Image (cartoon, rainbow, N blue to C red):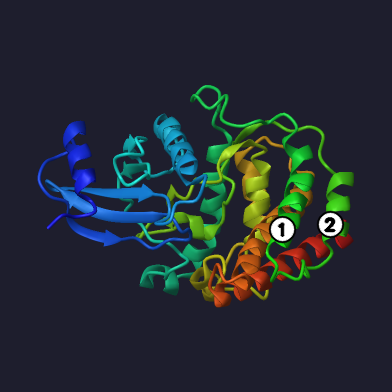
Amino acid sequence: MTSALDPVEHWMDEQGLGHGPLESVVPISGGTQNVMLRFQRAGRSYVLRRGPEHLRPRSNDVIRRECRVLRSLGGTAVQHPALIAACEDESVLAGAVFYLMEPVDGFNASTALPALHQEDAAIRHEMGLRLVDALATLAAVDHVAVGLGDFGKPEGFLERQVPRWLAELASYDAFAEYPGPDIGPVAEVAAWLDAHRPTDWTPGILHGDFHAANVMFSRTGPDVVAVVDWEMCTIGDPLLDLGWLLATWHLPGAPDEFAGPLTRAGGLASPDELVRRYAERSSRDLSAIDWYVVLACFKLGIILEGSHARALAGLAPKDIGDRLHLTTLRLFERAHELIQQS
């Protein structure tokens, strides 16, 4: 019987990656629509990652970018899945590029907590601090030295954010079923961001979607063993990653969106503790950190509202669209609260 993965077998033969059939093939669930499969071949374990089953126009470009990031991080201290090999030939796997990486021995806190972590508040508290350590390690990487000098456009990065995401929000009007954004003080938040934008910052690697559900934790303690889902990575202001973590950290009214089991278990480090930890690990200026949190709320809220718009158009499950719309409301509430306190 012909298998859909036969082309992968043949390609692996050409790369010298084992021999024989792919065995114990199981899908890996995650926070994106990208396809991930774990399998064994000749006694070695692999994880295959490719774009969604129904490829979007940019799906292959996203996977190519992820490959480049993982390859560049190979010689750094950043915790990440190790890249084994990449196939950028779209003819091999029905139009999809893909890559193989080493499996990560860890757990995702958005799924469940092991008994050790569920029962030990001190470990849960330290997990948040180790998240910050992982961020600081990434932000310290010299992106030029690791070959990512042309990976993004850091010039004008902060200036582009507000118009870029307002345009994204406006694009949802293309869905006839979408009544327009009813998500809070968008214009007020946008104006505040433009008026208070930092003018002095140092470019670096930006993960782009850094929160507790996009890392793998050690099964034996609080350590981060791998940062995953690099599809939004670029070269920009790394402090936006810290803002993103703070924006999603124990978000009232949206407890299940970002590592719900960890949030519900409680005992987490406070936002102030997370900022202090980052300050201990990095020389970056954190005086405007609230601005980055507001920007993260603004950007992420608009991204999630896109799923709501697509759900209303019948292009995504309604329950997911409703849930993400609620999360967008909570994010804009958090942004508004920070603006009022500033």
Residues at discs 2 and 1 in contact (Cβ within 8 Å) = yes
**How packed is label 1: few (under 14 Cα within 10 Å), some, or many (20 or more)?**
many
Quadrant in which the N terminus is drawn: bottom left
Q: Position of residue 49 (x, y in %)?
A: 36, 49
Q: Position of residue 240 (x, y in %)?
A: 67, 46
Looking at the rendered structure, which numbered label has been put on residue 297? 1
Nearer to the camera, 137 or 19: 19
Disc nearer the start of the sequence (2/1): 2
Check disc 1 and give the amino acid type.
Cys
Q: Position of residue 152 (x, y in %)?
A: 61, 32
Determine whether the residue tagged by mark 1 lies in a helix, strand or loop. helix
Residue occupying the point 58% across, 38% down: 234
Check disc 2 and give the amino acid type.
Val
Quarter assignment of residue 105? bottom left
- Which residue corresponds to mark 2? 189
**How packed is label 2: few (under 14 Cα within 10 Å), some, or many (20 or more)?**
many
Residue occupying the point 26% across, 61% down: 26
Residue occupying the point 69% across, 71% down: 177
Determine whether the residue tagged by mark 2 lies in a helix, strand or loop. helix
Image height check: is 147 above or below 42? above
Nearer to the camera, 332 or 305: 305
Quarter assignment of residue 301? bottom right
Q: Report, in whole angstroms, how far the alpha carbon at label 2 lies from the one at label 1.
A: 10 Å
Looking at the rendered structure, which numbered label has been put on residue 73? none
Residue occupying the point 63% across, 47% down: 241
